[in-house]
Amino acid sequence: MHQIYSAISHFIDKREVESLNRQLISAKPINAREIEIDEKRYVNFSSNDYLGLRYHPKLIEAAKSCIDEYGTGSGASRLVTGNFDLYAKAEQKIAAWKNREAALIFASGYQCNTSVLASLFDKNFLGEEPLIFSDKLIHASMHQGCKLAGIKQIRFNHNDITHLSTLLEKYKDDKRPKFILTESVFSMDGDIAPLDGLYALRDLHDAFLIVDEAHAAGVFGDNGNGLAHKADLIIGTCGKALGCFGAYVACDQKIKDFLINHCGGLIYSTALPPSAIAAIEAAVDLMPSLDSERKHVITLAQNFRQQLDEVGYHTGQSQSQIVPMIIGDADKTVQFSDSLKDGSFWAGAIRPPTVPQGTSRIRFAFSAAHTESDVANLIQHIITNKESIAA
Ligand SMILES: Cc1ncc(COP(=O)(O)O)c(C=O)c1O
């Protein structure tokens, strides 16, 4: 038998022992609020469809009519024959929404981070290895991008401007190109990066600031255009608050031109299906009209945080629609997630390696599709089942 099989058995057995083995579950969406699993309905607190747009009639109509005209696929990379007129239109809209000169669409946030960062940090093109200062909690896809570029990151403590400043100071006479990497709203903690401090350090050290706005776009900012307005390059996904699929960089034209020539994820990958682009465009068009949805989702999360704090649960530094209920122990976290299921609430247990050891948590993601009574029922269930975590 090939060695891969014994290596896999060893890997999976270890995961089982540590209660960290993951499995795909089969889920059937009912609407933006509910999901059906094993013939049981749950209120879904695990979706990143923060504005509940997945079932919006305008998005559905845009995607459907696009399929009639363009078919189901693009047939080629954008550099071959897959660059239909609707790409440029959607990119112009994204750039205008984000107040940037240009935008470039990618297949997914993961693919965008891995390939864009690998491209920008390429030492062959830069002439030397760049210095990458990254927040310790950046998303796995950003790590992958650094790894692909063969870069060893210089990691600063999460959201710790003083630590970043010390590290930048240490390298102040080093002339290699400096980059700072962070997220604006962090995916597993729901806290917000100290952006003003980051801009100041970027300016002081002549660095280039890249911010992943995956969880901020749509929810924060004017017309939902995010938080990191002064970053040098913004990465965003269309699979979360935009309710679609795909991702984008928002940047200046020069960087867009460079990526078209140098970024493998764009050059060597089939363009997104036209229907996905049409849905993205429809979602961006809707953004200015969604202030009440933004307010609703943020208020639900605020109320939830406050009530969890009152009953003694830690929600970290969350300031957004993402609220972690930090339990610590992986087994207990899974048990509590199971108890939530008994109450017909679906909220995932998040365990290492996704989050640091000892910080296993239930990640609640709120959506404009949730109601106040969904949250009241959830709180009541948590209070009633409190003992099962403490045990
Ligand atoms: C911060 C961050 N960046 C990127 C991604 C990947 O985006 P996508 O789901 O579009 O691949 C995620 C997804 O969870 C994320 O949380």
Image: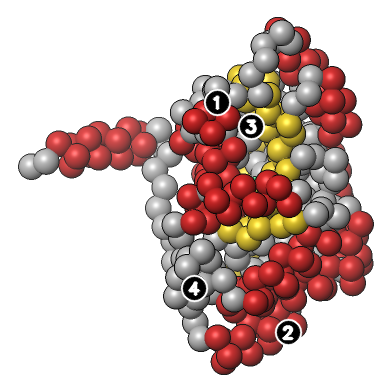
Label 1 crowd (10 A; few <14 / some 14-19 / many >=20): few
Mark whose residue sits in front, 3 or 1: 1
Cα separation between marks 3 and 2: 36 Å
Which residue appears at 59% of the width and 38% of the height? 120
Quadrant in which the N terminus appears: top left
Q: Earlier in the sequence, mark 3 or mark 1?
A: 1
Residue 137, numbered label: 3
Cα separation between marks 1 and 2: 50 Å
Mark whose residue sits in front, 4 or 2: 4
Residue 389, x across and y down, in percent: 61, 38
Q: Secondary structure at mark 3?
A: loop
Label 4 crowd (10 A; few <14 / some 14-19 / many >=20): few
Q: Give amino acid for label 3.
A: Leu
Q: Give amino acid for label 4.
A: Thr
- CB atoms of marks 3 and 1 within 8 Å: no
User: Is residue 108 something one can see in this rendering?
Assistant: no
Asked if ligand 1 lies within 8 A of label 1, the reply is no
Mark whose residue sits in front, 3 or 4: 4
Which residue appears at 88% of the width and 53% of the height? 221
Which residue appears at 46% of the width and 60% of the height? 269
Which residue appears at 82% of the width and 43% of the height? 228
Residue 57, numbered label: 2
Residue at which label 1 appears: 127
Residue at which label 4 appears: 81
- Farthest residue in the left direction? 1
Q: Earlier in the sequence, mark 3 or mark 2?
A: 2
Q: Earlier in the sequence, mark 4 or mark 1?
A: 4
Above or below, 76 relative to 152: below
Above or below, 24 relative to 73: above
- CB atoms of marks 3 and 4 within 8 Å: no
Q: Secondary structure at mark 2?
A: helix
Mark whose residue sits in front, 1 or 2: 1
